[in-house]
Image: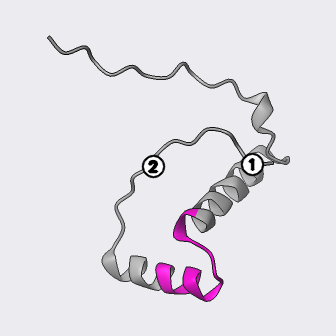
Amino acid sequence: MLEDRTARLTILIDPRKKAVFERLCAEEDATSSQVVRRLIRAYIEERQGRPWRPEEIELPPPKRAPRRR
């Protein structure tokens, strides 16, 4: 199932690890985002002890940008 919403996650990583990670991703013909999403899903499933089911999680309402005067 393709999830219908996305959110940005910004991380800081050692430049050497980033270079190796991106090379390994390219070798498997995957983007770094695809691999990170797969890793996050595996982590969630490992910690919860069951398959990921996004329909069970209620999302908070979207944040609105502050109004400018």
The residue that appears at 46% across and 85% down in the rendered structure is 20
Q: Amino acid at mark 2?
A: Leu
Image height of 8 relative to 46, above or below: above
Q: Residue furthest front?
A: 69
Q: Which mark is residue 34?
A: none
Q: Residue furthest left?
A: 69
Label 2 secondary element: loop
Residue 29 appears at what percent x and percent y?
64, 81
Residue designated by label 2: 9
Left or right of 66: which side holds 5?
A: right
Q: Residue furthest right?
A: 50
Left or right of 10: which side holds 44?
A: right
- Magenta segment range? 22-33
In the image, is residue 25 part of the stretch drawn in magenta? yes
The residue that appears at 27% across and 17% down in the rendered structure is 66
The residue that appears at 72% across and 58% down in the rendered structure is 42
Determine the CA span between mark 2 and mark 1. 18 Å
Q: Which of the pair 40/32 is nearer the observer?
A: 32
Residue 40 picture quarter: bottom right
